């Protein structure tokens, strides 16, 4: 018997409460051998429009496996459940834009399988986790094939000039891929012009700068301080690129 593929978790659940634990139990109920890695549980809460640009960045270095992605403010409504296949990773999650930017989509399908008992408010546990686990174990799951351009968010821009994540240091990741900007480019936030620095040690003290972060995204920071507090950045804050 082959070992299951690893499962990677990306959610906006946070660590408080029963949700992450129950998600893991739902996975391992299918096969106790499953390897589960917690990528992050503080994705932009209830903002699939922002998390969609963070997801492919944090998954870029993952070995082959299943990504269980849940940022699902429309749970219990009419949004569909999806399986999205790429050459290296298979994603399971809601059809609300979250999976639309994972790149190089080879196949997509709407999940038609449903469990006998289904909570109206926790499809991550009751639908997405069992499906991801079964796929990781090489099983088939009932689904209806759809074209990649039919996914919600397929028509969203390739890069998003907005803040998509703020880390514990107050640094602000954006939805712009860093390899798209040369060091000569600047970010414009109102009257403030933010210039490039290669890394923190080369930035000027107390001056906002942008750099190419370890996830491959443009990130706004301040050496020794919180960019979010200092220049009033929040999830969804927009900027111009000049």
Image (tube, helix red, strand yellow):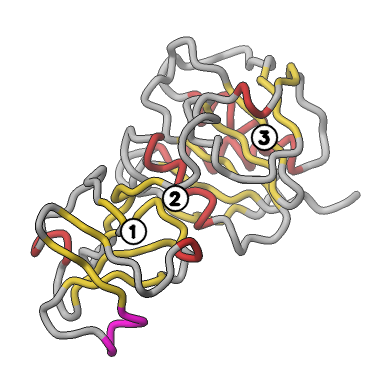
Label 1 near label 2: C-beta < 8 Å? yes
Assess disc 2: are there few (<14), some (14-19) or many (≥20) residues with their C-alpha within 10 Å of its C-alpha. Answer: many
Q: Residue under circle 3?
A: 84
Q: Is residue 137 left or right of residue 45?
A: right
Q: Name the outermost residue toward the right.
A: 1
The residue stretch that appears in magenta: 197-202
Residue 21 visible here: no
**Residue 26 appears left or right of 137:** left
Q: Secondary structure at mark 1?
A: strand
Question: What residue is shown with label 2?
Answer: 54
Above/below status of 83 relative to 187? above
Q: Position of residue 106 (x, y in %)?
A: 76, 38
Residue found at x 44% / y 50% = 54
Q: In percent of the image, x 31 and y 39: which residue is there?
A: 45
- Image location of residue 22, percent across then percent down: 48, 37
Q: Position of residue 151 (x, y in %)?
A: 58, 25
Classify residue 186 by image quadrant: bottom left
Front residue of 75 and 44: 44
Nearest the viewer among 157 and 132 is 157
Q: Residue at x 69, y 61 (%)?
A: 63
Q: Relative to 123, is 163 above or below?
A: below
Q: What percent of the width, then of the height, locates residue 124?
A: 50, 30
Front residue of this view, candidates 231 and 225: 231
Q: Secondary structure at mark 3?
A: strand
């Amino acid at each position: 018997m082959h070992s299951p593929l690893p499962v990677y978790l990306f959610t906006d659940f946070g660590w408080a409460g029963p949700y992450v634990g129950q998600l893991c139990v739902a996975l391992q109920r299918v096969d106790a051998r499953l390897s589960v890695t917690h990528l992050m549980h503080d994705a932009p809460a209830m903002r699939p429009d922002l998390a969609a640009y963070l997801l492919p960045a944090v998954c870029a270095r993952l070995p082959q496996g299943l990504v269980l992605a849940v940022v699902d403010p429309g749970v219990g409504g009419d949004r569909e459940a999806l399986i999205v296949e790429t050459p290296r990773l298979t994603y399971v999650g809601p059809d609300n834009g979250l999976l639309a930017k994972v790149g190089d989509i080879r196949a997509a399908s709407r999940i038609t399988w449903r469990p006998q008992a289904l909570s109206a408010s926790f499809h991550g546990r009751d639908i997405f986790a069992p499906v991801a686990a079964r796929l990781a174990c090489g099983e088939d799951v009932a689904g209806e094939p759809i074209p990649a351009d039919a996914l919600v968010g397929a028509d969203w821009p390739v890069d998003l000039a907005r803040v998509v994540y703020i880390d514990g240091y107050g640094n602000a990741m954006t939805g712009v891929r860093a390899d798209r900007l040369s060091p000569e480019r600047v970010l414009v936030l109102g009257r403030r012009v933010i210039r490039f620095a290669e890394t923190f040690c080369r930035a000027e003290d107390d001056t906002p700068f942008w750099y190419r972060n370890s996830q491959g995204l443009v990130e706004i920071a301040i050496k020794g301080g919180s960019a979010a507090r200092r220049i009033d950045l929040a999830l969804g804050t927009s900027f111009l690129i000049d």
